[in-house]
Each structure stands twice: as structure tokens, then as C-alpha cells.
Image (cartoon, rainbow, N blue to C red):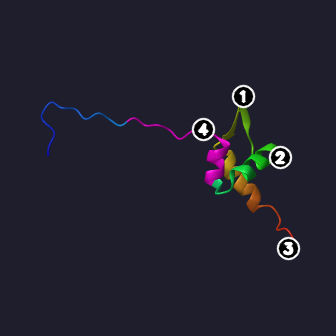
Amino acid sequence: MAEPRGATAVPETFDPPPMLLTVEETARRLRIGRTTCFRLVRAGEIESVTVGRLRRVPADAVPAYVAKLRHRPAEAA
């Protein structure tokens, strides 16, 4: 059905992707466990920042961590 004359469409608001992720969101993106992700953050393997009392992971730290894993030499089995 067509819009009535004079009616204007309301543009959808653009909500940019988050710049900071929770550790849980980071774990979901990496498809790893929450505890493992907290351990990696605590060890400094995944970059994180403190905002007040909150620990957050910059969104660009996730692909940086994956790139670091890809360039790491294979461990002996």
C-alpha cells in the first residue's frame, strides 16, 4: 500500500557498532569461554582499558589478537 500524500518517511537512525566491548561480548566474538577470555585480558594477551570500575576491550583489539595468534609460531605437540 502506498504512503498517503504529504506523509514523510522517518529515516532509521544509524547506531554505530560499539567501540568498547565487555569481556563477555569479546568472548562471544572469539567463540571462547568467558573464563578463558577474562584470563587472556588479565594476562594482557587481549588489550583492555578501564572505564571507572569497568573493564572494557576496544573493538579493534579483537582482530589484533587474532592477527597475533596467526603470526605466532606453532607450538610443538
Q: Secondary structure at mark 1?
A: loop
Measuring 50% from the left and 38% from the top, which residue is drawn there? 16
Measuring 13% from the left and 36% from the top, which residue is drawn there? 4
Which region of the structure is painted magenta? Answer: 13-29
All told, the count of numbered labels is 4
**Disc 4 residue type (three-letter):** Met
**Disc 2 residue type (three-letter):** Ala
**Residue with the most extreme right position:** 76
- Asked where in the image residue 74 lies, by quadrant, the reply is bottom right
2 and 4 marks in contact (CB < 8 Å): no
Return the residue nearer the eye: 30 or 69: 30
Residue on which disc 4 sits: 19
Q: Secondary structure at mark 3?
A: loop
Disc 3 or 2, which lies upstream in sequence?
2
Residue on which disc 1 sits: 53
Disc 2 or 4, which lies upstream in sequence?
4
User: Dot 2: within a 10 Å radius of its alpha carbon, few (fewer than 14), some, or many (20 or more) residues?
Assistant: few
